[in-house]
Amino acid sequence: MMMWVRRIARLTVAAMLFVVLAIQLVRPARTNPPTDPSAVLSARVEVPAGVKALLDRSCRDCHSNDTRWPWYSNVAPVSWWVIDHVNHGRSHFNFSEWAKYNSEEQRKLLKQSCELTRKGAMPLPSYLRMHAAALTAEDIQALCKWAPRTIDQTTVD
C-alpha cells in the first residue's frame, strides 16, 4: 500500500513539474511600444520635478510605454497576470500617448488620477506588494495640487 502511495505521489509531482515547464512556452507579448517624445505627458504639460518623480515611481510601469518589467514577468502564469495588468493600465491612461487624448479626456484623466490616489485605489495594492511605490500623504497632496492647475491650463478642443 505504501509503495502505491509513493508511486502516485511521484507521478503527481512529475506531472505538476511537466505542466509548470510546459506553460512557460505560452508567452504573451511583453512590450514597450516605441514612443514619440513629443507626445508624452511631460512634453505637453508642465510637470514639477516632485510630481514627475512620484509618477515615475508609482505610475509609470502600468501607465506608460516605458514599463520596467520585473523578473517575475518572465515566469508563467504570473507573467500572464502582470502583462494583462500593464495592458489594462495602458488602455485606461498612458503617459506616453498623452497627445492622443483630446482636452476633455485629458482633464478627466488628471481629475481621476487625484481621485483614485486619494481613495487608495491607485497604485493597485497588488502592485504595492512587490514595489516601493506607495504614495505618502505628501505625494498625494502634491499630485492633487498639480492636477487641477494642469486641468485649468488644458483648453477644450
Image (cartoon, rainbow, N blue to C red):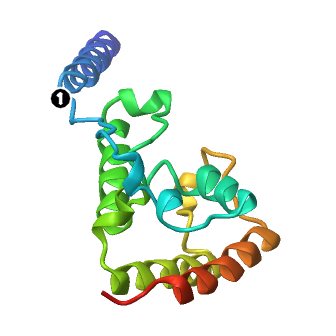
Judge left or right: residue 45 versus residue 35: right
Image location of residue 129, percent across then percent down: 62, 50
Image location of residue 130, percent across then percent down: 60, 44
Image location of residue 50, percent across then percent down: 75, 59
Front in this rendered view, residue 124 or 38 = 38
User: Quick one: quadrant of the N terminus?
Assistant: top left
User: Quick one: quadrant of the C terminus?
Assistant: bottom left
Q: Quadrant of residue 82?
A: top left
The correct choice, above or below, for 82 with respect to 97 in the image is: above
Front in this rendered view, residue 145 or 59 = 145
Which residue is at a point 33% across and 68% down the rendered structure image?
Answer: 92
Q: How many labels does the image show?
A: 1
Which amino acid type is marked by label 1? Val
The correct choice, above or below, for 135 with respect to 87 in the image is: below
Element type at mark 1: loop
Which residue is at a point 82% across and 71% down the rendered structure image?
Answer: 138
Give the class, few, some or many, for how many residues have Cα within 10 Å of label 1's Cα (few <14, many ≥20): few
Determine which residue is flagged by label 1: 26
Which residue is at a point 29% across and 40% down the rendered structure image?
Answer: 33
Judge left or right: residue 91 versus residue 96: left
Image location of residue 122, percent across then percent down: 55, 69
Residue most toward the right?
Answer: 138
Q: In which quarter of the image is residue 117?
A: bottom right
Which residue is at a point 30% across and 78% down the rendered structure image?
Answer: 102
Judge left or right: residue 33 versus residue 146: left
The correct choice, above or below, for 107 with respect to 46 in the image is: below
The correct choice, above or below, for 154 with respect to 138 in the image is: below
